[in-house]
Structures are given as structure tokens and as C-alpha cells.
Amino acid sequence: MPLFFASFLGEPLPVADYWLWLAFPICLAISVVYKTTKVERFGEIFPAAAVLFVSMIGGLALVTIALWLLTRL
């Protein structure tokens, strides 16, 4: 059994086709956890996390476009 776990952890997951889409769940998780530690009331968590999520995805999109444009020059 330990050999199975060692081989599983030694090989990367096959995410080459959709790795960019993995930014959405990680940004969502980071924004919810961060805002959970920062807001005063429970009702403020999800609107604040949504704003942070959109800001993070927008920033990543702008950086991606800027880097793509830089490589095309």
C-alpha cells in the first residue's frame, strides 16, 4: 500500500489541457478564507469575497494579456 501512494505522489496530475481554469477555484477559496478572517459580520463575507474574487481574476487576466502582448512584440 505505501508503494501505491509513493507512485501516486511522484507523478503529476494530467492537467495540461485545462490548467488555466484551475485559477478559478483557487481564487475563490483564497477570497472566501481571507474575507472570513477580515470581516466583522457573517453577512458581509460573501459579498466581500465576491468583490475580491472578481478583482483577483481580473488582475490575473490583465497580467496574462500583458505578458501575451509582450511576447508578441
Image (tube, rainbow, N blue to C red):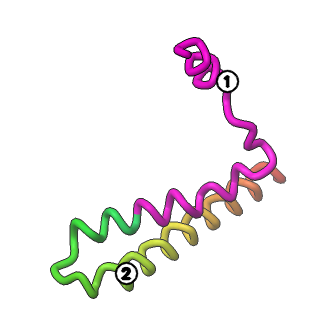
User: Could you tell me which secondary element the residue under label 1 belongs to?
Assistant: loop
In the image, residue 38 sits, relative to residue 18, either above or below, namely below
In the picture of the structure, the residue carrying the numbered disc 1 is: 11
Numbered range of the magenta stretch = 1-30
Which residue is nearer to you in this view: 60 or 1? 1
Pick whichever of labels 2 and 1 is earlier in the sequence.
1
Instruction: Give neighbour class at mark 2: few <14, some 14-19, many 20+ (Cα, 10 Å).
Output: some
Q: Are marks 2 and 1 in contact (CB under 8 Å)?
A: no
| Main secondary structure of the magenta stretch | helix
> Considering the image in quadrants, where does the N terminus appear?
top right
Question: Would residue 36 be found to the left or right of residue 26 on screen?
Answer: left
Instruction: Give neighbour class at mark 1: few <14, some 14-19, many 20+ (Cα, 10 Å).
Output: few
**Alpha carbon separation for disc pair 2 and 1:** 36 Å
Residue at 82% of width from left, 53% of height from top?
Answer: 73
User: Could you tell me which secondary element the residue under label 2 belongs to?
Assistant: helix
> What kind of residue is marked 1?
Glu
Question: Would residue 19 be found to the left or right of residue 24 on screen?
Answer: right
The dot on residue 67 is: none
Which residue is nearer to you in this view: 59 or 39? 39
Question: How far across and how far down the image is residue 26, in percent?
Answer: 51, 57
Residue at 23% of width from left, 82% of height from top?
Answer: 42
In which quarter of the view is residue 58 placed?
bottom right
The extreme top residue here reads 3
Residue at 58% of width from left, 24% of height from top?
Answer: 9
Which residue is nearer to you in this view: 3 or 39? 3
The dot on residue 46 is: 2
Question: Would residue 14 be found to the left or right of residue 51 on screen?
Answer: right
